[in-house]
Amino acid sequence: MVPPRIIDPRTAFLVDLAKDLLPLHARGAQIVISMDTNERQYQLENNIVESSLATLGLKDVIFWNHSR
């Protein structure tokens, strides 16, 4: 039996997502993610989900194309 991870669920989601996306992104895959993260911060440093995805080389195309 595998012991449960002691980690914040939001952080666990981002860790697992990164683990799955990195190999695809490294092979040049075009990745589209749509999610409602309940984050209202429009500053990248305050938005945990967006800043985590940015470290993977992904960007919010709506804000990228239409500013914040």
Image (spheres, rainbow, N blue to C red):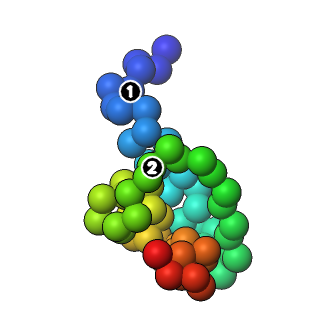
Amino acid type, mark 2: Glu
Mark closest to the chain's N terminus, 2 or 1: 1
Q: Residue at x 49, y 14 (%)?
A: 1
Apparent side of residue 38 relative to residue 24 in the rendered image (left or right): left
Q: Quadrant of residue 5?
A: top left
In the foreground, 11 or 2: 11
How many numbered badges does the structure rendering display?
A: 2
In the foreground, 51 or 39: 39
Apparent side of residue 64 relative to residue 44 in the rendered image (left or right): right
Which of the two marks, 2 or 1, is nearer to us in this view? 2
Q: Secondary structure at mark 2?
A: loop
Residue 14 % position (x, y): 46, 49
Residue linked to disc 2: 39
In the foreground, 44 or 19: 44
Query: Is residue 33 positioned above or below 64 on the image?
Result: above
Q: Quadrant of residue 52?
A: bottom left
Amino acid type, mark 1: Arg
Characterize the local packing of mark 1: few (<14), some (14-19) or many (20 or more) Cα atoms within 10 angstroms. few
Residue 54 % position (x, y): 44, 71
Q: Residue at x 46, y 75 (%)?
A: 68
Characterize the local packing of mark 2: few (<14), some (14-19) or many (20 or more) Cα atoms within 10 angstroms. few
Q: Residue at x 58, y 55 (%)?
A: 20
Q: Could one spot residue 16 in this view of the protein?
A: no
Query: Is residue 20 positioned above or below 9 on the image?
Result: below
Residue linked to disc 1: 5
Q: Quadrant of residue 32?
A: bottom right
Query: Is residue 8 positioned above or below 35 on the image?
Result: above
